[in-house]
Amino acid sequence: MQDLLQRTEAALSTLDPSDPITRCPASVLALLPSQPDPLIALAHSKLHTFPFDSVPTCWRRLYTDASIAKAVALIRHGIATGDESGVLHECGASKRGNSEDGNSNYEARSEEWVDDAVKVLDMASIMAGAAGREDLVEQILSTLQAHLHENQPPSKKRRRTEGTADAFPVAGHWGVSRIPIIQHPMTSTIAPSMQAFETHMKTAQPLLIKEALTHWPAMHERPWSSPSYLLDKTCGGRRLVPVEIGRSYTDAEWGQSIITFKEFLEKYMLSEEEVADASKLGYLAQHDLFAQIPSLRNDIAVPDYCYVEPPPMRSAMEVAGLADGSKAMPPQLEEPLLNAWFGPAGTVSPLHTDPYHNILCQVVGKKFVRLYSPDETNKLYPKGVEGGGVDMSNTSKVNAEAPAEELDAQFPLFRKAEYVETILGEGQCLYIPLGWWHYVRSLSVSFSVSFWWN
């Protein structure tokens, strides 16, 4: 630990002249080693002055380096106020207060510095992308996680596992009672060859792929269906994650919050109670969890199908009805874009389109998915430009599962649109061609990974 802290401090104090952070005022950089808090506040204000894509890199770099400097100070203080290695004490009457169950109040206090350091580093990743320091931030977090494993009291390890089932609740109010009847099933196949998949792509039709994830560790030896495994991979649940609050991002009461992974599990994923109010649902949606926590990335693999050469971008956009000049062509991707989708039963991705081909892989639970061809767009009532100039034309105004009488009254063409649908189960993948509209609802606790590519 000490060696890593020294190397980190050296990296922060030795800046390459070409480093974007050097564009910050010299008077600001002079405060970096000793006063990181005001620099974090300054950089935070700059991050909110510009649209995220337009924030000058120097301010994202400043937010990152100031956060690392603060984390180093927290870790050093935590180690200094513990013993020589920062051990979380199991015994030692002089350092502990007793609680009714005989456990240590000090034990909780001795972990506070870890909580604070993890929070600071995760905020650097979430707010600034850990700009220029991705590997260093991950190294510090991995070292903290290893430190916790090495020094965790045996009694606490026992308490974490005794008397608790290491599984997510079975689908309840939002799941079993609302499993739809599949009336228009889509084409499905069992793990097609690359050649067969390439041939299918030329049809520009969706495809349900079965038995495609059997080799993923996340399905077996490193199971994402295990809450304790996920807690272990997130530094005992200390890692911060951005969570959407509400059933769908199109709902008026929808919001967002950054909370610890442990709080997310306890509040939204592990409750056995029925959720009668959809606005109380929490969803870790479209988040690059694997850049933030690379060890989870090792539990999965990019499907080989993502390396099949798709139709030329312009041709694919024309097939999808997106090449009329009204929208910019999406950038060419060097590697697939990965996103995590983790939430309880009842969470919804409203009817929308994406600017890339998509392989949606289901690791835990089940989802209901309905898809509409780009040819049906005029019946799907796309939104337009909304408040603040946000272009929402890739999202439909329609709640795809609203009662028929409501749909006919408000959107008379919608129920005339042709569609295909499926229930996506564990170990299955769904190929969604570029431009296809899709509506997704979780039928149980669900963990999915999407792979966008072009």
Image: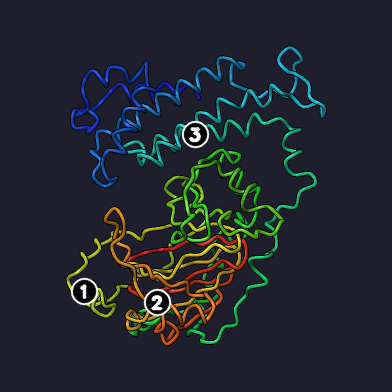
Q: Which residue is mark 3?
A: 119
Q: Amino acid at mark 1?
A: Ala
**Residues packed near mark 1 inside 10 Å, few (<14), some (14 to 19) or many (20 plus):** some
Camera-side residue of 226 and 216: 226
Q: Which residue is mark 2?
A: 194
- Indicate left or right for 182 with 390 as reference: right
Q: Amino acid at mark 3?
A: Lys
**Residues packed near mark 3 inside 10 Å, few (<14), some (14 to 19) or many (20 plus):** some
Question: Which percent across, then down, holds residue 226?
Answer: 65, 54
Query: Which comes sooner in the sequence, label 2 or label 1?
Result: 2
Say whether marks 3 and 1 touch (CB < 8 Å). Answer: no
Q: Which residue is mark 1?
A: 323
Quadrant position of the C terminus in the picture: bottom left
Q: Is residue 178 above or below residue 61?
A: below
Res. 148 image quadrant: top right
Q: Is residue 12 above or below residue 172?
A: above
| Label 2: which secondary element | helix
Gap in angstroms between the C-alphas marked 2 and 1: 28 Å
The structure residue drawn at horizontal position 35% and vertical position 18%, both measured from the top left corner, is: 33
Q: Is residue 391 above or below residue 127?
A: below
Question: Which percent across, then down, holds residue 305?
Answer: 40, 71
Gap in angstroms between the C-alphas marked 3 and 1: 43 Å
